[in-house]
């Protein structure tokens, strides 16, 4: 006992350690009571419980989900393992030097995975960015401070066409020039002194053929060009199949199948480049400073990897099959219902899936109606996918992914499916306006009002009766447009290809002479208001 602690103890009859413990509890109770009035201490000095589980979210008006969909960030990935939670809690009780911590964790990750080195990142997306920065500037301090303004630097990232996806923005945000290639000949012509890195999204398409991961790595190796493989949602393989194929780096999400912290990821690979990636990231004042990962996530991620080597993956697979079998047996007696099992093609969301088919005319509900009904119900259930629309596509199905379901969820899902398919709500076909379709052929100047900001676009429309087609010209990108006009009601959609992504537009509205207006939905990007004026010839 230290002198100060001894004096404190004699004066109060309470040790410093016990006092600090009491202070910590009081602080938590005070903070909790501010958020949760029910958590305020009771008259007898005991604290009412803070809401946990679903109630924690319901208390602020957020509805939890029974996850029959898989490891999607939009529905918060996965549920962290108890061991990971414990590690994160323990890590939160001490101060450490982050450089020292990441060095120790890097060595441990190397020992577990067989990679030369490893670091914990703020998700797989940040692993992409940090690896790109490492390939551009290494640990050159001046170059690191200059990014992303890279005149004279290696500023090119090659991406095979089969690997373009929304997550390659992790490389694009460094300001690199993306070169898209589709053949070995294009790859060979594109690799040069300005090539910083090749990015590949691991998938069935990247596992075979002339543009496979192994073939690309073989072509890049003599030129000294690093290759990053994005395996975010995949199972962690030990020894790592991508590093064995010749990749320089491989990145994983922490909050998917590993069931680590949702805000963590894993970068494994060549030691000097992986260490350079950490050099580019927080807590260092370089381009990755905003991609902070704390000591809690670092130790939680390390624990998730440790636990991955101890989990009984065969037993998990058999449990998923048992859950799906229970659901299948519950719904199969219903009229027109048939089932099939869908097996995974790759290591992402690697679990068996159950697809339940039925005739919407027989059961009086379509797949999309069922999905919407159970999404709005309590408990709230979301499926991997759903098909079937009224009135023209009544053959329906929903697909169940058990990968992230928790014990007991299968019974809840089976009961909800059986109840809703047996006695569905009443649905009617959407009413189609009658009358002569408005003439909307021609060129239209379009104004969009976003939540913040405005945009200007153009429609170039052709019309054949009710059918509409044409071109959608944006401020930066262009797309093809398809849709319908019934009386004065219009509904059309377009897809604007963007490098690695696509912008989906779904316009609805009304026509009044030489003007149109309505709403446009933009998928994950929300909604906007739009109006259009016909351009005079």
Image (cartoon, rainbow, N blue to C red):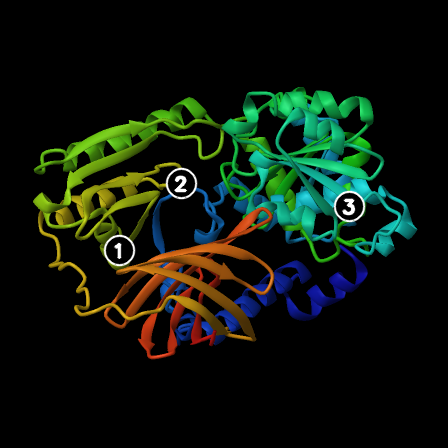
Tell me the residue at 24%/58% (across/down): 377
Residue found 52% across the figure and 68% down from its top: 457
Image coordinates of residue 404 in percent, x first then y, are 40, 40
Percent position (x, y) of residue 360? 14, 45
**Label 2: element kind:** loop
Identify the residue position indicated by label 1 in the image: 372
Q: Which mark is residue 404?
A: 2
Nearest to viewer (mark 3 / mark 2): 3
Compared across the picture, whether 4 is left or right of 420 comes to right
Q: Can the viewer see residue 100? A: no
x and y percent of residue 326 in the render? 21, 33
Q: Label 1, secondary structure: give it.
A: helix
Q: CA distance from mark 2 to mark 1?
A: 20 Å
Q: Position of 437 compared to 224: left or right?
A: left
Tell me the tag on residue 184: none
Residue at the spot of label 3: 133
346 and 377: which is toward the camera = 346
Mark 3 vs mark 2, CA separation in Å: 33 Å
Mark 3 in CB contact with mark 2 (< 8 angstroms): no
């Amino acid at each position: 006992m230290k002198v100060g602690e001894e004096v404190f103890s004699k004066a109060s009859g309470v040790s410093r350690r016990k006092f600090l413990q009491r202070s910590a509890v009081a602080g938590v109770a005070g903070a909790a009571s501010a958020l949760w009035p029910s958590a305020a201490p009771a008259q007898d000095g005991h604290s009412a419980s803070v809401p946990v589980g679903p109630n924690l979210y319901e208390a602020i008006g957020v509805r939890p989900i029974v996850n029959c969909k898989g490891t999607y960030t939009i529905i918060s990935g996965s549920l962290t393992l108890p061991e990971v939670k414990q590690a994160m809690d323990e890590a939160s009780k001490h101060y450490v030097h982050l450089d020292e911590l990441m060095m120790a964790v890097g060595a441990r990750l190397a020992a577990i995975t067989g990679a030369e080195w490893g670091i914990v990142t703020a998700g797989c997306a940040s692993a992409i960015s940090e690896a790109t920065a490492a390939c551009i500037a290494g640990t050159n301090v001046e170059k690191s401070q200059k990014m992303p303004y890279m005149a004279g630097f290696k500023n090119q990232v090659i991406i095979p066409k089969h690997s373009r996806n929304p997550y390659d923005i992790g490389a694009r945000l460094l300001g690199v020039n993306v070169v898209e290639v589709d053949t070995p000949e294009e790859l060979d012509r594109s690799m040069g002194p300005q090539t910083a890195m090749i990015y590949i999204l691991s998938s069935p398409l990247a596992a075979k053929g002339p543009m496979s991961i192994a073939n690309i790595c073989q072509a890049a190796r003599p030129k000294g060009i690093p290759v990053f493989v994005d395996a975010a949602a995949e199972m962690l393989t030990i020894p790592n199949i991508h590093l064995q194929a010749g990749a320089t780096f491989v990145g994983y999400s922490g909050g998917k199948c590993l069931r680590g912290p949702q805000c963590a990821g894993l970068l494994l690979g060549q030691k000097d480049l992986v260490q350079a990636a950490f050099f580019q990231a927080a807590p260092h004042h370089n381009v990755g400073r905003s991609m902070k990962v704390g000591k809690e996530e670092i130790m939680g991620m390390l624990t998730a990897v440790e636990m991955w080597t101890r989990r009984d993956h065969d037993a998990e697979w058999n449990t998923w099959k048992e859950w799906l079998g229970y659901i299948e047996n519950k719904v199969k007696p219903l009229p027109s219902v048939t089932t099939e099992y869908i097996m995974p093609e790759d290591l992402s969301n690697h679990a068996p899936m159950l697809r339940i088919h039925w005739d919407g005319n027989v059961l009086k509900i379509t797949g999309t109606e069922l999905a919407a009904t159970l999404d709005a119900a309590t408990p709230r259930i979301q499926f991997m996918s759903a098909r079937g629309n009224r009135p023209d596509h009544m053959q329906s199905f929903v697909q169940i992914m058990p990968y992230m379901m928790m014990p007991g969820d299968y019974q809840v899902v089976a009961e909800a499916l059986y109840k809703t398919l047996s006695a569905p709500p009443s649905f009617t076909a959407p009413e189609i306006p009658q009358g002569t379709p408005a003439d909307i052929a021609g060129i239209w100047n379009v104004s969009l009002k976003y939540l913040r900001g405005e945009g200007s676009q153009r429609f170039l429309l052709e019309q054949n009766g009710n059918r509409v087609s044409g071109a959608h010209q944006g401020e930066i990108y262009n797309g093809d447009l398809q849709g319908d006009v019934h009386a004065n009601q219009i509904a059309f959609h377009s897809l604007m290809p963007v490098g690695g992504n696509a912008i989906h537009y779904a316009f609805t509205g009304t026509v009044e002479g030489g003007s149109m207006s309505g709403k446009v939905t933009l998928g994950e990007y929300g909604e906007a208001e739009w109006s259009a004026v016909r351009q005079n010839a």
